[in-house]
Image (spheres, rainbow, N blue to C red):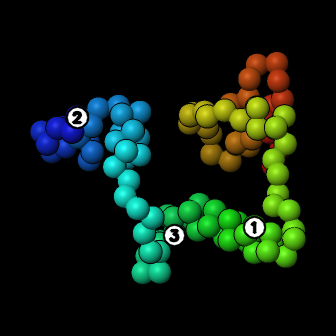
Amino acid sequence: MMSRDAQRNLSYTGIAGIGTQDQAVTESMAVISDKQNEHLGTSDGAIIHNRKVMVNAARGMLEGIEPMKHDPAVLAKVRSHEENIPFGADWRLYGAFAGEDKGIKV
C-alpha cells in the first residue's frame, strides 16, 4: 500500500520494498501507448537499444531471417549482482559463482 507520508519523507514511490514496487507498477500498467511523441533521453539508452533490436528482428522476419537466439547454457549462468568495484576494474570478473567462469565473455 502506498503511503503519502513515506512518499514525502522516505522514497518517491511511498511503497516499501523493491518487489512490492515492481508489483505495483506491473499491475497498474495501462494499454500500450503511442510512442511517437515520446521524448527519450540519454539515460534511456537501454530502452532505445532494445527497441531497435526488436524492430530490426521484426523487419528481418518479414524477409525470412530468423531472429537471434540465445544459448540456454549462457543464460543459465546469468545472475544479478551488486558490488562497488575499483575504478578501471574489469567488471566481467565480478559476480561469477565460485568454481565457475570468472564472468561471462562479452
How far is mark 1 from mark 3, CA to CA?
Answer: 23 Å
Residue situated in front as seen by the camera: 81 or 57: 57
- Residues at marks 3 and 2, CA–CA distance in whole angstroms: 32 Å
Q: Earlier in the sequence, mark 3 or mark 2?
A: 2
Look at mark 1 in the image and give the residue it sits on. 57
Q: Point out residue 91 in the picture as x, y percentages from the top left corner.
A: 70, 42
Q: Give the distance between the C-alpha atoms of the residues marked 2 and 1, in whole angstroms.
A: 39 Å
Quadrant that contains the N terminus: top left
In the picture of the structure, the residue carrying the numbered disc 3 is: 42
Check the image and report above or below for 106 versus 2: below
Residue at position x 85%, y 76% in the image? 63
Amino acid at the residue labelled 2: Met
Residue pictured at 79% horizontal, 74% vertical:
62
The residue at the far bottom in this view is 37
Disc 1: CA contacts within 10 A as few (<14), some (14-19) or many (>=20): some
Going by the picture, which residue comes out furthest to the left?
5
Q: Point out which mark residue 1 bears.
A: 2
SS for callout 2: loop
Q: Quadrant of residue 65?
A: bottom right
Identify the mark nearer the N-term, 2 or 1: 2
Residue 10 seen in render: no
5 or 50, nearer to the observer: 50
Of the residues shown, which amino acid type is indicated by label 3?
Answer: Thr
Q: Which residue lies at the image location 27% right of the left edge and 45% below the top edge?
A: 13
Please, what secondary structure does the residue beneath circle 3 have? helix
The amino acid type found where label 1 is placed reads: Ala
Sooner in the amino-acid sequence: mark 1 or mark 3: 3
